[in-house]
Image (tube, grey):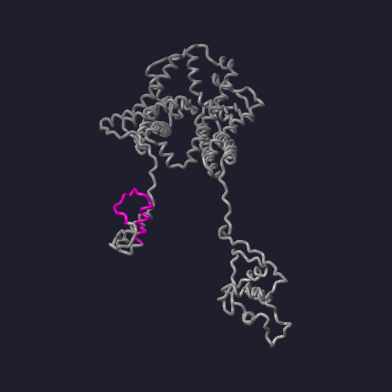
Amino acid sequence: MAPDLEGSTDPGPAPDDTHSDPTAGSTPAEDTAAEGLTDGTADGGARAEDVAEAAAEPEPEPCAEVDAGPPPEPVSGFTRFRAVTALAVGPLATGYLTIATLLAVVAGSASNSRFTTAGVLVAALPGWLAAHQVPIEIYGLELGVLPLLPTLGLVVLTAMAAARAAARLGLYRPGQARLVIGTVAVAHGLAGLVVAGVTVDAEVTADPTKAICYPALVSALAATVGVARRCGLLAALRRKADAVAVAGLRAGARAVLLLLAAGGALLVFGLATSVPAAKALVPAGAGDAVGMLLLSLGYLPNAVVAATAFVAGPGFALGTFAVAPLEFHGGALPGVPLLAALPEHRASWWPALFVLPLVIGVVVGRRLRDADEAPVARLRGVAVATGVIAVSLAALAEIAGGRLGKGPFDPISMPAAALFITLVVWTAAPGAFVAWFGGPRPVPEPLPSLTDDEDDPEPAEEIADPDPDADPDAALEDERDAHPNAGPKADFKVDSNVERDADPSADSNAECDAAADAEPKAESDTESDEQLARTPGQQDPTEDPAELPSPRDAVEESGEVARD
């Protein structure tokens, strides 16, 4: 006997304390709510309402994983100033000195050049712009096809400087990366404007607008790469984008590397089969040979991009010389050892190179076939990967080409638009096919029936034909004995699940059920009442005995009326 909230002596479990452990399971809370509802008191009702509201509140979702990174450390103002200054000036000075050193090596090793320190430092200014892919003009002739290897070197230097600055400043959040990226971009943009202003009246000039935008863009991308891991930019991207999109980005990036590797392999094959021609293009002097080697190394990434465009199909053109797997137009070529890999005539096996981008498209599909159970979602991942591939290589093709004065070798072009379209075709079609048919497919759910199986009524048993030899009066008497309280007008209702009597006549009469809500006709009711009121063998004196129905016919007629 446990008292309830009002002190009654009704038996039952004691209610839980309102200050119970909130981490307890749901069962005690439900018991408390039930006690409060059955209590009938004001306190019990209030407690039940509180418990119900607490149970109705959704549980808070767990917080997404956030890269904690290193704990924030207090940074003094002087240390902050030194770190930001080093970030703004360091990459600029390092890049400029690197370009000046390369020019000094080339100028010092050349046989017919005059080397002066002032001349090298002045020439390094437009060289720094060229390393950031800013087109420059030499005596009014544009040099737009610029080497990509110095650009990659400056990107690496800027990324390392950005990572060191982020570590010194104690940055660890994605929003804090703006300080590093913005500082680097503004510093390079201002430096480009200054260099373009210094070279206005010189023989080598540059467009001030491009001198501001291109260095700022290149340095900003490099700084983003440098602080991506430190400030958790990659983790933030994974949290905001869905898993299929992230998988598509990864597959697209790997496919870009594979395509560039295929182009590089083709370039190596061309050089390996043209070693004698490459040796013939190397100058005789040691200094000239070093300069030619540095020039070839600087344009080596450009040649890889051109070879990749050849593998994809559009090919490239160098002045009047144009080459693609399906076409070839010969022409004059510069005497650079790197260009010895170019063919002298068309080969019949070149179209077989189309297998390479197709295989890479299949690889993309295989990497995305397990990205999601839904085939349509996997197609979205293939679309993301295809976009990454097409946009990246089209941008590289646009950067790697450009104007080359106004001579017979102008321009060096790699059709970016045609490359974009062909890469979409080569990678999207096989990738979508493999991702659609090669991945898991959701098990189709069975179509819901109109009625549940549990609610389906059992099939009605067939009504057995009455035995013609059975006595109809005896069968009617048995039915009246089975329903003694039915009165003079009895409605028979037989459960189909109840086992019937072995007598065929009893089965026939049991199947003739009269519905409780049925309204039989007045004549049928009257006739049925009179027939039930008579004793077996008794007849109405006013009726012809030959026209009187038998008891069995009366029962069957009443059953037909009930079914109607």
The residue lying at 44 percent from left, 39 percent from top is 238
What span is colored magenta in the figure? Answer: 14-37
Q: Is residue 475 left or right of residue 85?
A: right
Residue that extends furthest to the top in the rendered view of this protein: 285
> Is residue 449 placed above or below 100 in the rendered structure?
below
Task: Spot the residue most to the bottom.
Answer: 542
The percent coordinates of residue 527 (x first, y second) are 64, 81
Residue 23: in magenta span: yes
Q: Residue at x 71, y 69 (%)?
A: 467
Compared to residue 414, the image places residue 513 above or below, namely below
Image position, residue 116 (x, y; %):
39, 16
Give residue 377's position: percent from left, percent from top: 53, 44
Quadrant (top left, top right, bottom left, bottom right) of the C terminus: bottom right
Q: Report which quarter residue 151 is drawn in.
A: top left
The residue depicted at 31 percent of the width and 32 percent of the height is: 169
Q: Nearer the viewer, residue 344 or 239?
A: 239
Q: Is residue 302 above or below residue 489?
A: above
Q: Residue furthest right?
A: 546
The residue at 59%/72% (across/down) is 482
